[in-house]
Image (cartoon, coloured by chain):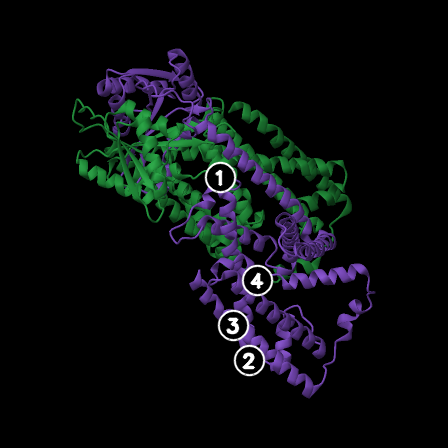
Chain colours: A green, B purple
Amino acid sequence: MREAGTLISIPVYSFVGAYLVMIVVGIIKAIVDGPGSVDEANIASHATESITLFLVLHTFSSGCTALTGVEAISNGVGIFKPPETRHARQVMVVMAAVMGLLLFGTIALTQFFGVTAHENETILSALTREIFGRTFPYYVVSLSTLAILVVAANTSFVGFPGVSSLIAQDGYMPRQLTSLGDRLVFSNGIFSLTACVAALIIIFGGDSHALIPLFAVGVFLAFTLSQTGMVVHWMRVRGPHWHLKAVINGLGAVTTAVTLVVVAASKFLDGAWIIMVLIPMVVYFFHKVHEHYQEIRPQLSLEGMPYPPAPVLPPRVVVPVSGMHRGTLRAIQFAQSISSDVTAVYIELDETRTEKFKADFEKWSGHINLVVIPSPYRSILGPLLHFLEAFDREQGDRQPAVLVLPEFIPGSWWQHLLHNQTAWLIKLAVIYQRRRHGGGRIVVDVPFHLRG
Amino acid sequence: MREAGTLISIPVYSFVGAYLVMIVVGIIKAIVDGPGSVDEANIASHATESITLFLVLHTFSSGCTALTGVEAISNGVGIFKPPETRHARQVMVVMAAVMGLLLFGTIALTQFFGVTAHENETILSALTREIFGRTFPYYVVSLSTLAILVVAANTSFVGFPGVSSLIAQDGYMPRQLTSLGDRLVFSNGIFSLTACVAALIIIFGGDSHALIPLFAVGVFLAFTLSQTGMVVHWMRVRGPHWHLKAVINGLGAVTTAVTLVVVAASKFLDGAWIIMVLIPMVVYFFHKVHEHYQEIRPQLSLEGMPYPPAPVLPPRVVVPVSGMHRGTLRAIQFAQSISSDVTAVYIELDETRTEKFKADFEKWSGHINLVVIPSPYRSILGPLLHFLEAFDREQGDRQPAVLVLPEFIPGSWWQHLLHNQTAWLIKLAVIYQRRRHGGGRIVVDVPFHLRG
């Protein structure tokens, strides 16, 4: 983590340095050259808007959105040198100051020079161009902006896998999210986040403006909840000055709650509704996941099992055979090696071949039972499943017969198309067939590899 | 087949009847009203083209394309009442006469009335509108045209599955194409053709004009081959008048071969190249399929096997266990019921849990071997496969150990996401792992169904 911190510090320092230099140069230029001319037509519609309460709140929420990110410090307290809290607090103060300086500096300069954003240029790029022209410093500032955005994008990939592994440990998300990959990160969380991000980029055509309403609702909901949580915390702990602290956090909670409502209302049709639909769905999913894990625990637990466990009886074995060849012979022989109660089943699709098959079968595996099932409609799966059920009922040992399946494995992938996928279909049907809870029918795959 | 013939006769008779009536009405109208005025601008570019040999051949090939379909009679000789040949010949003469009448009648009338096709209207619709106006007879003619096109589209679905099942019987196409479905048709051929047709419609955006070059090359190649085949036939059989017959078919072969070359050359860039690339690929595919079926026959044949077959030794069994619960206990018990040589394998991902596991394991299945494999990089598949290979080598009985896999089956599909798919991954890796030709490692699935 400390190494990652060092690596990340390079773009951060470059960005802050480049912008501070730009603001200083901008102020000098402003003093020397005087104000720029604003393209009146471009801002006319906004300028005539009257200052309503809604506009104030809307502006406030936009400003808040611009400042999100500072809170990332608190997620990373653990990576600071001890005393962690003091160092983290110092960094937070410095960051807030730097961010304030950069934000107000750039806003003041854009206003002063009358710079506006265009379809193919951000307002920051336009401002930099105004100050430096298209010279070397312009590219330094632009590249450092790109670098800081990459770092910003990375914070989710640091945070999400950690948070989701915590939720998964509590049993509210798939437990695969708790497993550390061989690079000591929660790889499954990273893969899941990557899939979600890719989906968002595709659905929204890579337009980051379209995604802001989704982001804003989520982030202000989180702020409101954490501020409210702090109020509850102070009310429980009641340390020195707890009233003051509770009031400060309460003010924070109210402010962010108001912002949340404003953003959700004003951006509802722009995409905020998606998050408002999604969050309850996600919570419901967490609940169902937890329910599932709770339900399977007693089903799997060995508590309540008779001890010592009763030995399992030797299995009855059924081998479906489509003809006699090395593959099926091997399956029959394996069946004989694990049980003395073996039944071969031949699904008769073409009567004229049955006699030949019977002769072959008797020659190679004479002393085991053979059941021939006519299938006038040339279906294999149906008659086989039907036979298995009837056979189990008839034997009445409450133990489903074990199915031994001969299976070809062709030499290369395309050759799979040249063989019936019967073994595969039977396997799927039998394994997923719900007989009852607990043990299902055991299926044995006897592969026979073909050259080719 | 006779029933299908009756069903098809309705649209055929409607079409022929409707068009004959239209031509008669058109001729009367032509006599009464006189010729229409041709939109000169529309045909000017064609009119100024000089009559070159190429133009003649091109016109000939377009005309030929218009008349394809008559040959479908010869594919269906078997469905006529006996004497089949005589009835089929009579039908062919009648059809050729009717088709000639319809074609020349409509061409003459379109010329006389100066009717041309437009972007959203076929020339036949324009002609019908010219003769009847948008009245009831117009809709009758249009609907009967639609019906005959549906019948025409159906001929491929009748012909292709039959032809492909014949090729598959000879071992040049996947043998699934020979299997009759429960409606007594070669369903797999129908499904394959449907997939190809859907692909063509999507790729060519449903534009039938774009598909004509593909069709024309294929159909004239087939005509050329069949005419040439008839010449060879007459030269071999040498019946009465065989010289004359050979000359007639030879003339047919030359004419269709010329048309083939003209179409292929003039429509090369319009799509004919696709067929010229595709046909060699298809032939290569046939060849590879045949080669595969030839190669596997001796590999599977029981000839050359020692007789009586040596009995198979009782298997060595390996059970991977991730923890002790009812699912794994069942797998261990099954393994014990089929062999006295059972080894459980525990892949250690987290050292701190090993002692607890060992105690549980000894309590529930004390008397079988347990191998603990540390996996510091938290991989399961790699260490397991590695162990299996080393274990087989060490035992040296030239018989791969049987793998018994405990597997959860959750109650509903989405719950699969909540469990590691380890059993499934192991199965895939082990079954498809090429050890050698012939018998691969046998894998036993011991499913445990969860409620929920």
Residue type of the residue flagged with mark 3: Tyr
On the image, which quarter does residue A171 sit in?
top left
Q: CA distance from mark 1 to mark 4?
A: 71 Å
Mark 1 falls on what kind of element? Answer: helix
- Percent x, y of residue B346: 34, 20
Identify the residue under disc 1: A417
The secondary structure type at the circle numbered 4 is loop
Closer to the camera in the image, A180 or A333: A333
- Chain that bears disc 1: A
**Dots 4 and 2: beta carbons under 8 Å?**
no
- Number of residues whose C-alpha sits closer than 10 Å to that of mark 2, classed few (under 14), some (14–19) or many (20 or more): some
Report the amino acid beneath label 2. Pro
Residue B86, image x and y in percent? Answer: 53, 63
| In-front residue for pair A302/A9 | A302
The residue wearing badge 2 is B137
Tell me the residue at 76%/42% (across/down).
A133
Question: What amino acid is labelled 4 in the image?
Answer: Ser
Q: Is residue A213 left or right of residue A439?
A: right
Residue B113 visible in the snapshot: yes
- Judging by the rendered image, the residue that carries numbered circle 4 is A50
| Same chain, labels 3 and 1 | no
Look at the image and tell me in which quarter the N terminus of chain B lies: bottom left
- Residue at mark 2 to residue at mark 3: CA–CA distance: 16 Å
Give residue B235's position: percent from left, percent from top. 65, 49
Q: Nearer the viewer, residue B393 or A346?
A: A346
Would you place residue A401 above or below residue B312 in this image? below
Q: Is residue A412 at least partly visible in the picture?
A: no
Secondary-structure class at tag 2: helix
Q: CA distance from mark 2 to mark 1?
A: 51 Å
Q: Which numbered mark, 4 or 2, is in the foreground of this view?
A: 2
Q: Is residue A243 left or right of residue B156?
A: left
